[in-house]
Image: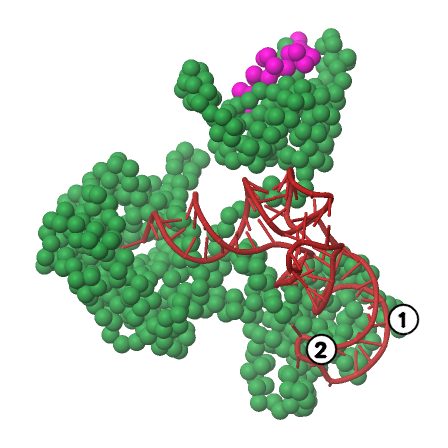
Chain colours: A green, B red
Amino acid sequence: MTDTQAKQPAATATNPFEARKVKLKGVIAQGGNPYAYTFARDARAGDLQAKYADLAPGTETQDTVTVAGRIMAFRNDGMFIDLMDPSGKVQVFCHKDTMPESELAKLGNFDLGDIIGAKGTIRRTPRGELSVRASMVEMLTKSLQPLPEKYHGLTDIEQRYRQRYVDLIVNEESRETLRKRSEIVAAIRTYLQNTWGGVEVETPMLHPLVGGAAAKPFITHHNTLDSNFYLRIAPELYLKRLIVGGFADCVFEINRNFRNEGISPRHNPEFTMVELYKTFTDVSDMMDLTEGLVQYVAKTVFNKDEFVSGGHTVNVTGKWARKPMCELVKDATGIDFMAITDAGEARAAVKKIGVHVEPNAKWGECVAAVFEEKVEETLVQPTHVTEFPLDISPLAKPHRNNPRLTERSESFMRGWEIANMFTELNDPADQRARFEEQVKAREAGNDEAAMYDEDYVTALEYGLPPTGGWGMGVDRLCIILTGSANIRDVINFPTLKPIKKAEERGSNYENASRSFAAKPASVPAASADWQTLDETAKRFIIVINEKEENMGRVLNAAGHAMAGLAGSAAQGEGLSFINYEDADKGVHPSISHYPVIVLKAKNSNQIAKVRAEAVAGGIACVDFTDDMTIGKTKEQLESLAGKSGEAVQYIALALFGDTMKLRGITGKLSLYK
RNA sequence: GACCGUGUAGCUCAAUCGGUAGAGCAACUGACUUUUAAUCAGUAGGUCGUGGGUUCAAGUCCCACCGCGGUCACCA
């Protein structure tokens, strides 16, 4: 390669993506591979930074290293390149004194974001930056997508979650937080194994019954078994079956759970818990576990005692306070629920301080309501709340000294519940009674109530030894310890609303045209009049309200509307039927030589607008409104008769008529896919 | 679900009372060469979320819709 060629601008395109593709070809032209197979690096950036921390500015060494990573900065046309790998950053110094012309020429095809390798000697520049004085550089993976602006990085919160890979490339904070999460989980595992003798197990995520917690489940379906399953809301009942089986004295599972509930800065639909069960321990031992674990994680992962989160400073050291719920409520409000035995009296007391409870709330539910309203957020420093009321703890063992209470505690930090502890219920008769109550609650409309798990009761009848149970929310612990503001910051890929195709800009007119251009595959010669029909003059269009999610209803609506159209309204428009014939002389009546286009509308209003235009333009149309999905014709008539304007909800609209007119009316709608 | 906020170039953001859509970074062309968000000169890059409306004139005002965020509600 000549000197002039080497300096030839590699790219002229102004679009960043196209410019990078030009450079990608440039890499190939230089004999490189823009998507290399491997690269023999022998050093990581972070390790070098540590190893040469004491190297004085201006020092050159003869230590030769080979590094690889992503280009994060590209100064002086590539003379200074910041290379980042998962361990850290190191500068690569590409100077003409130590790099042959053929190597320097490669720089012209480098961009921010490319993965490259470099070989050279270690030095520290006079200004103090540790560098690799390169003798060779090599493209390893060409990045076609431009990185976000280097100073501000990626700030769009949604995009950070949606494209976490970009977020991780450019935001050190995100890398740090998510790596800490991994370390926290590893520390939890170590602590439970080493200090508590826990055996890590895996139990099903597909549950035939909902149980182990109060939450709404996701439902999924197994095709071959033709059965519905629930994604687990808690692993509890399976873990205790293992204890019954004598599998181990102590089992735990770091478990993903799924709850079909709201999303908030503290709730993700799928979230991680740890649950542990250990024989011959009780709720009091489990409180020791919470403390010990948090302190262990704080020490080994962060080497800190205090954590700043949500404007609070939380100190996790020492012996945590243990207080009964009723006592905390009494301290905060003066109400002594222990002195109240009647639920009605409890409700009156609650009402007096302006806390809302259901009209038929039980005693324990009143206590809990006041606790949540008045106490919870004040529990900033680690606190164990003990002696939960039985009424709100359907799976906990009654307290040994007071049947209204249970052997259940929860641990709080920065006002959040982080752990839940029990002396496990091991009396099968009691368990059976609890399930029966849950079933009643479910039948009364509480879709969070547990289902009757007969097999679990059977397991208890074989005998569950005295056992302590413990559960902790890993995500919340991570939020607090990493000082994050949102649960999404501690989850690699948080649940987001799927992006709808409808968001594609502009009309899908081209797509519609393409569908339009697709002619029937074959037209039978046996038919009499098909040749006289102009396939392009008229067409059917079905407009579906995209908000209608039930596919059965959509098909039903489309079918109804088309049937109505074909059967009456469109007859006057010159609609023709053809009897197709197969080789066996079988007749297939059809109208398929008319293009049928299925479009979607954003909502009922949009359908109404299309309809108004169609009517004005003399297009035959048939409506399908939600009124037509109810009862008998008489009720449908009455239902619609009571509505005007926007109250009329269209599910679908079928149109038949002149192609050009229909294009004008429906050109802005997208294809229904 | 309710309320508030927000949506402008690949990225981060401007645009006064409604009056020719701008800057920095990234990109491209060139200059320079021990830089640290390199610098300097130039070039290109826009469906102002979508659709209506008011107006001589709309990024700006009004309405509807969509996305996102926050708060609340729901929810351990």
Residue B37 location (% of width, % of height): 67, 75
Residue A41 location (% of width, % of height): 64, 73
| The stretch drawn in magenta includes residue A292 | no
| The stretch drawn in magenta includes residue A560 | yes
Residue pictured at 64% horizontal, 36% vertical: A670
Comparing A134 with A18, the one in front is A18
**Dot 2, how many residues are within 10 Å of its Cα: few (below 14), some (14-19), or many (20+)?**
some
Quadrant for the C terminus of chain A in the image: top right
The answer to whether residue A396 is left or right of residue B59 is: left
In the rendered structure, find residue A80 and report the number of the disc placed on it: 2
Is A631 placed above or below A433 here? above
Three-letter code, disc 2: Phe
Identify the magenta region.
A558-585
Residue pictured at 74% horizontal, 20% vertical: A537
Comparing A591 with A184, the one in front is A591
Looking at the rendered image, the disc whose residue lies closer to the viewer, 1 or 2, is 2
In the rendered structure, find residue A4 and report the number of the disc placed on it: 1
Q: Element type at marker 1?
A: helix
Is A241 placed above or below A519 here? below
Q: Element type at marker 2?
A: strand
Residue A580 location (% of width, % of height): 67, 13
Task: Report whether residue A383 is seen.
Answer: yes
Quadrant for the N terminus of chain A in the image: bottom right
Residue A577 location (% of width, % of height): 66, 12
Comparing A546 with A479, the one in front is A546
Residue A90: quadrant of the picture? bottom right
Residue A295: quadrant of the picture? bottom left
Three-letter code, disc 1: Thr
In the rendered structure, find residue A544 and report the number of the disc placed on it: none
Residue pictured at 71% horizontal, 25% vertical: A661
